[in-house]
Amino acid sequence: MTSSSPTRRAPLLATYAAFVFAFIYLPIVVLILYSFNRDGVGGFPPRHLTLNWYAQLFADAPIWDSVLNSLIVAASSVVLSLGLGLLAALALDRATFPGKALFRRLVLLPLILPGIITGLSLLMFAVFAGVHLSLLTVFLGHGTALISVATTELFAGLQKVDRAQEEASLDLGATPWQTFWRITLPNLKLSLIAAGLLIFTLSMDEIAVTFFLIGRDNTLPLQIWGRLRRGITPEINAVSTLIFAVSVALIVIWYRVRARGLGTQAQELLERP
Amino acid sequence: MYSRAYKSLVSLPPLLWVGIFLLLPYALMFAHSFWAVREGLVVHQWNLHNYKILFSNPLYAGVLFRTMRIAAAVTLCSLLLGYPLAYYLSFHAHARKELLYQLVIVPLWVSYLVRGYAWKTILGSDGILNGFLQYLHLTHEPVVFFLYSPFAVVLMLTHIYTPFAFLPIYAALEHIPRPLVEASHDLGAGSTQTFLRVILPLSMPGLLAGATFAFVLSLGDFLAPLLVGGPSGIMIANVVQTLFGAAFDWPLGATISVFILILTVSLLFLSELLEKRWSFK
């Protein structure tokens, strides 16, 4: 880790990197700034800072209904896709069955295909099955599409798990069931939390699949989408700023969890005789 | 080591679920592409009519070419922004590397819709960019072509996919053994030569993965054109969306979807193949 070769200063490259960062962050900064602007989302410079848009937002019942809907869909999607993703990861890691390669590709398909294709396929399936569109169809869509994320994360986690621990557990007389709960699952704790957070955030933000599966009750992104068509007010900036704050909070929590996990792992290593 | 019962217990539920809720819907999409519409109803009459329309109607070819052009522009811009950034982080950021890396990741957690909306408020005719230009007395009338143009779509998608392009490039650059770079310098190569003959070829798989991400993700986007594209920024997925909505021609919509699906999967397959060929070791 000594001097990695081209250590000479590169002012031009540094300036360019700063420019790219500015490009990436410009819309986010603008968004937050104008959520406090009394005169709406246009114009420059922003004048007369106010919290009115936030006050309006907190009194806006449809928005909070949609937030609740999104939370319900996201939380249940986490449960469904983590459960099935865990089994799928175990199956891919440990079982052999006909069509395994096809299964792996199929599970990952929603991750690489444009959302509109997965969304429309599920819409046709709902019509075919005679199911009315509602939050339930949105949940089934999210939960199913996000099995891909859970499987990827948990399969990577399983690859790092020490198989010898499970063998020892089985040799010492524990049942496969006990081994699963006491060895396999605790070893996957970090991957489960990581996948859960990722699925939750992706579901809260999902719009391409939701677009085609939504019934009468809106999720938050669909609610915002509907308002964008009717004209825009800084109230949308305010709700976006809050979503941003919550996302950043989730990332910080995730790093804390991971740091603690790494800490205990390092400690265990040190305490080994 | 694992019993038969264990193996079937973990395999069966996801197999069944994925079979019913993914394989069946995708299969239904394929089936629809061979069906027809009569008097506002989808009839299960197997035919190739939809594929004939897709390949003979110049309207669809036109939108498809525009979509490809937009996706290619987004890919090029994302690489032009993402590669130098990844190179800077990997070779020049030193102690700040971890922090800067996190700064690239954070926007990935910010809602797609929210970022698109932000661009809309910036580019609009009474938007922030126009306000800024008038504030500086550079323009006196609002400039209208910022928003509702293919340019706006490329800008918004570039903003969203630059971090996606950055990630695999950065990973590839981090994996380059530093002694190789040092050896190149020791043997008398300059910075440019080292970059062109050592670093760039070794980072090719990452570059390719980043390009594939940006291109494939842009190809199927239908929200950016609706948000900031306007009529001149319509892409192929918008045509699909209209066929499933107001135009009510599910079979033709399914046909175009199948076409996008096949295009996406072949591009990913091709990229995987090239990546394997270009990886060292």
Image (spheres, rainbow, N blue to C red):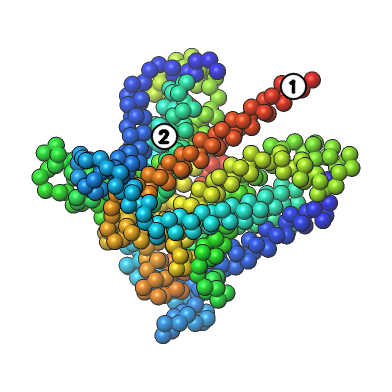
Q: Which mark is residue A196?
A: none
Residue sitting at 54 percent across and 46 percent down?
A198
Q: Give above or below for B234 relative to B131.
A: below
Please, what is the three-letter code of the amino acid marked with disc 1?
A: Glu
Residue B182 visible here: yes
Q: CA distance from mark 1 to mark 2?
A: 43 Å
Total residue callouts: 2
Residue sitting at 67 percent across and 58 percent down?
B14
Between residue A9 and residue B133, name the one nearer to us: B133
In the drawing, does residue B29 fall left or right of residue A80? Answer: left
Residue sitting at 72 percent across and 26 percent down?
A268
Please, what is the three-letter code of the amino acid marked with disc 2?
A: Tyr
Tell me the chain of label 2: B
Indicate the position of residue B127 as horizontal and vertical percent values: 22, 48
At mark 1, the secondary structure is helix
Tell me the chain of label 1: A
For label 1, the residue is A271
At mark 2, the secondary structure is helix
Q: Residues within 10 Å of mark 1 (few under 14, many from 20)?
A: few
Residue sitting at 36 percent across and 30 percent down?
A17
Q: Quadrant of residue A266?
A: top right
Closer mark to the observer between disc 1 and disc 2: 1
Indicate the position of residue A36 as horizontal and vertical percent values: 29, 42
For label 2, the residue is B83
Q: Give above or below for B105 relative to A109.
A: above
Tell me, yes or no, whether dots 1 and 2 are on the same chain. Answer: no
In which quadrant will I find the N terminus of chain A? top right
Q: Residues within 10 Å of mark 2 (few under 14, many from 20)?
A: many
In the drawing, does residue A236 fall left or right of residue B213? Answer: left
